[in-house]
Amino acid sequence: MKTARQTSPLRRRAAQAVAQRRERRRAQPRRFGGLWRYLAVIGPGIIVANAGNDAGGVFTYSNTGAKYGNHLLWAFLPILVALIITQEMVARLAAVTGKGLMDLIRERFGVRWTLFASVVVLIANGGTTLAEFAGVAGGLGLLGVPLPVAVIGSAVLIGVVVMRGNRRIVERIFLALGLTFISYIIAAVTVGPHWGEIARSAVVPDLSHPASVPSASYLVDVIALIGTSITPYMQLFLQSSIVDKGTGEKHLRMVRADVISGSIFAVIVAMFIVITTSATLFGPSAAYPHGLGGVGVSSAQQAASALAPLAGVHATQLFAVGLVGASLLAAAVLPLSTAFVICEAFGAERSVQSSFAEAPLFFTLFIGILAIGAGIMLIPGVPIAGVAIGTQTLDGILLPVLLVFIILLANDRRLLGARRNGVAYNVIAVALATVLILLTTVLVLTTIFPGLIGGQ
């Protein structure tokens, strides 16, 4: 027999409320199922695309705007297509096979190619990590933070986050760092550019350039603009992080959405950096009577500092915040990418979820690269520009090889089955790979032999 307490109206109403809440929770996934699945999968694609807009990328985009104005904005549309195609293949390989790129290269092409790629990645990523800490120091320096505090503090912060946090926390922090890129969009709006001219430049190719810029320099700048958007470490980290997250084939549609949305956001940010520096530095102004057209800037920090007399100190601060966020994100992703690659090459345990005892090589590589990058930055007179050029050359050597591997693996019936590339997809992928291979080859040759391409 039920008691009076159990049959009271208050008790019944409470039970009904609980039942209604449960029903709403059951109904939510059906109503917003696609959104929840996207939010569960989101992360690697957006993180890696934003990491591509690192300190070197910010400098390249700043220099493009200051040197060429809006004339090269049209290049970002093919850059976007190339970025989406390349990263979609990598993401598909990860979701379907559950293996990292180096794992698949070792299994399909042998140990020699794997060791070659691993050594190049270790050297190139180590040098690029140094450049990222230079970006952190430069950005925080504009905000009044001393160099030692900026470098040591950022290295310790990154180390603690990755070593002490689980995968979900690390991923959320990386995503939060990506929000700092919005500062570039705000900075662009602040300087008041000519939006009509920008819209036309974004869709109409313009191959003209200032007469003071030699044809060889123009070609190298165009190649650098394209090459800085698709780097080897981005592809390696993307595939490894998707595998580490445990995302499978059933989530492939959401993985693609993550990659596409991340690529679009990253390219938009890059365009706004060009727009900002174009509007303030390309043409003549009170601070620069002759403008910087045909000259460009020597660093991202110079571009940020130059905004103050033209658009106010807040524009400089916004630019500096974006530079710090970009550099911090890349300074974290690069050592992680390297640790994933080396551990995959040797079949060692690798996961942000693991403890140090479970994955000693993974975390030793991560902390070692992080410490070396930050430590070298503190040495007076370090030729950071020379290191950046050298690592860019190594990346240029590795990228064509990696692209060929990715296309061959994406066409492997044994690996992907029905998920392998189709004919139309292959036509686009091979065409893009061929163009990128030609461009990066020219970039490497002109870097090693500066006088190879001459003329005005």
Image (cartoon, helix red, strand yellow):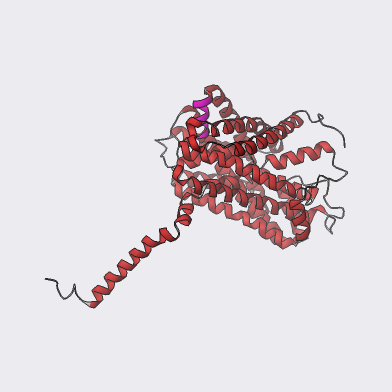
Image x and y of residue 205, in percent: 78, 47
Residue 90: x %, y % from top left = 55, 38
Residue 6 is drawn in which quadrant? bottom left
Instruction: Where is residue 428? Give x, y as percent.
Output: 64, 39
Q: In the figure, residue 429 lies in which quadrant?
A: top right
Q: Is residue 264 above or below residue 421?
A: below
Answer left or right for 17 relative to 451.
Answer: left
Within the magenta stretch, is there residue 345?
no
The magenta region covers: 99-108
Foreground pick, 308 / 26? 26
Viewer-closest of 358 and 235: 235
Q: Is residue 106 magenta?
A: yes
Question: Going by the image, does 34 lie left or right of 56?
Answer: left
Outermost residue, front side: 423
Point 58% across, 48% down: residue: 260
Q: Position of residue 366 (x, y in %)?
A: 51, 37
Residue in the image at 51% along x and 26% along y: 108
Residue 95 seen from this side: yes
The reply to whether residue 382 is visible in this rendering is: no
Identify the residue shown where x is 25% and y is 76%. Answer: 10
Dividing the image into 4 quarters, which one contains the N terminus? bottom left
Picture quadrant where residue 283 is located: bottom right
